[in-house]
Image (spheres, rainbow, N blue to C red):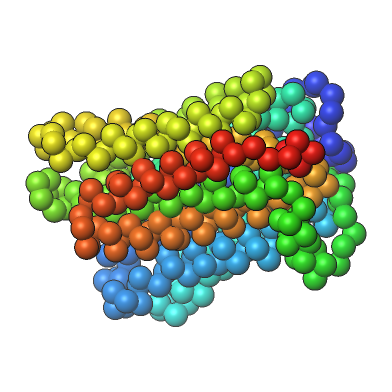
Amino acid sequence: MSSIQLAHENTHESALPPSLVLLLAAGAGLAVASLYYSQPMLGILGADIGASERAVGLVPTLTQLGYALGILLLAPLGDRHDRRNIILIKAALLVAALLLGGLAPSIGTLLAASLAIGLTATLTQDIVPAAATLAPVAQRGKVVGTVMTGLLLGILLSRVVSGFVGDQFGWRAMYLGAAASIALIGLAAWRGLPRFAPTTQLPYGALLGSLRTLWLRHAALRQAALAQGLLSVGFSAFWSTLALMLQGEPFHLGGTVAGAFGLAGAAGALAAPLAGHLADRRGPELVTRLGTGLTALSFAALCFAPLLSPAAQLVLLGIAAIGFDLGVQATLVAHQTIVYGIEPGARSRLNAVLFVGMFIGMASGAVLGSQLLAQWGWIAVTAMATLSALAALAVRCRKIAPELA
């Protein structure tokens, strides 16, 4: 597909070239991975750059803060401007931010680079709506699911890769390698992406104000954001406390083992295209209920872990990680299919609202999970995750007015 073509809403049945779908999936995954590379390397990073634990701890915090601000303040621009230009500009800025991080002489420079990485990694949030626009209507769920698989694998595998690269070659090598990967994605996007017709002429202030209007206008958007946010509470609580739990009784295992459970979660993420295909054939509503139900069942199974031997508990953790990760990601793909069909001219803004809800859930889960683990132990974390998933299922089972669905 030529980069000089203009992409409109794809209502015919011509399939996207596999190479273009692969480009979109790889771009989404590598961009979002930039948010997580620093986390396993904080120990060696702090020692090398001469910074305190508190200062180094701000690196991932500022990265996530930048990403949240970018979703809210930058992602809506995809409706106002050519998404191809936005993707290329953000890719170039993300390369510069990663290079600044890799070459940072002090913690202050690294913190500034971390905020910039978070802001520009919202490149991911421009790629997913682009995929939804390019895909034929009958295949939108499958295409979005494939791109989301790339995104989710980027999240789940980034820590594994950066932990290995940081140990073997140093933390700066990881930042520089990440910059090279985004540069390649930017070059491929420049050659392969079509241009996108803007869908609104709203000035920037009105564009941001329309987020509230969309929220109030569409019950289906509110339902999707609330349900995905509730699922994200348990998801984040699990992953943010897993390493601490495994370090204690009766396991005494290190962070490498916790990272290995991320590979189990990646197995669930690989099924995202199947969820999208099912959404195309049977409707996304069914997939949201199956996904939230599977997530609740997987978290509930973890509540019985104390009754098992340590070895059996590890097996159960792995099986549950596959189950709830599949449930969360399948539900997210189905929610995106629903949201992107609400108002095609506002896809970037609708996507921003959905992911702000998801981010709020992730942040809340991390805080609640650490507090529950400290006060009442792992069983409290799994119980909370189960209840939040059941609440998401209740939200998805609630009927809304057909004209807003």
x 12%, y 45%: residue: 251
Above or below — where is 342 with respect to 110?
above
Front residue of 292/321: it is 292
Q: Is residue 365 left or right of residue 256?
A: right
x 49%, y 63%: residue: 64
User: Which x, y percent locates residue 135?
Assistant: 74, 31
Front residue of 195/223: it is 223
From the image, which quarter does the C terminus lie in?
top right
Residue 326, visible in the rendered structure: no
User: Which x, y percent locates residue 372?
Assistant: 28, 59
User: Which x, y percent locates residue 203?
Assistant: 86, 67
Locate residue 259: give its quadrant.
top left
x 46%, y 55%: residue: 362
Q: Is residue 189 left or right of residue 111?
A: right
Q: Is residue 58 left or right of residue 187?
A: left
x 71%, y 25%: residue: 139
User: Which x, y percent locates residue 383?
Assistant: 30, 47
Residue 228, visible in the rendered structure: yes
Above or below — where is 295 with respect to 57?
above
Residue farthest toward the right in the current orientation of the protein: 201
Front residue of 157/252: it is 252
Above or below — where is 388 with respect to 146?
below
